[in-house]
Amino acid sequence: MVGRVWVVEIGAKPALSTPAEVATFNSDINAKKNYLRVLTTICPHLGCSVNLDAAGTGFLCPCHAATFTVDGIKAGPDNVAPRDMDSLVWQIAPANHNRIQVKFQAFKASERTSIAI
Ligand code: FES
């Protein structure tokens, strides 16, 4: 499946120079979570495409004004989004440590939890 994603750098890029280091990093969920978030652009409300806000400090859905922090967390008390932006599975590409590979996935809209479809 192909789709658009937002890639948000949360922490410092890990020093990875060998295939073994990449494999170890890729198997460490917490290390990955502390480095990058890969978020689908599909809004969890009704499926519009979520964009960066004007200040570049978070995300805004143009359809019904759902807002999210830059790491995809639902923001504000009057937010129509039922959940945070959906995170995607990713890994450092084994053959090129400067690239990531993302498993694109779609999720049901309007659910309180992420349900893959
Ligand atoms: S589809 Fe994004 S806020 Fe409604």
Image: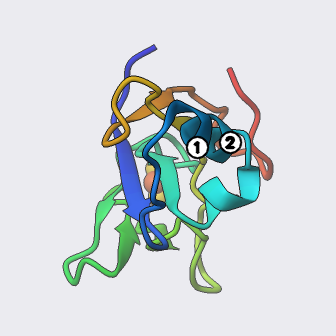
For image coordinates 60% across by 48% down, the residue present is 86
Residue type, label 2 = Thr
Residue 44 position within the rendered picture, expressed as x and y whole percent measured from the top left:
58, 48
Left or right placement of residue 1 versus residue 6 in this view: right
Task: State the image coordinates of residue 76 (x, y, percent, origin top left).
Answer: 58, 85
Task: Say which quadrant the C terminus sits in.
Answer: top right
Residue nearer the viewer, 26 or 37: 26
Q: Give whichever of 15, 57 is nearer the camera.
A: 15
Residue 114: x and y, percent?
Answer: 74, 42
Quickly name the residue at label 2. Answer: 24
Coloring scheme used: rainbow
Does the rendering let one see residue 87?
yes
Which image quarter: residue 60? bottom left
Going by the image, does 63 lie left or right of 110? left
Residue type marked 1: Glu
Residue at 68% x, 42% y is 24
Marks 1/2 in contact by CB < 8 Å: the verdict is yes
Q: Residues within 10 Å of mark 2 (few under 14, many from 20)?
A: few
Q: SS class of the residue under badge 1? A: helix
Q: Which residue is mark 1?
A: 21
**Pick the front one: 90 or 67:** 90
For this orientation, the residue located farthest to the top is 1
Position in image of residue 37 (x %, y %)? 52, 57
As drawn, the label of residue 112 is none
Q: Mark 1 and mark 2: span between their CA atoms?
A: 5 Å
Say few, some or many: other residues with alpha carbon within 10 Å of mark 1 (under 14 / 14 to 19 / 20 or more): some
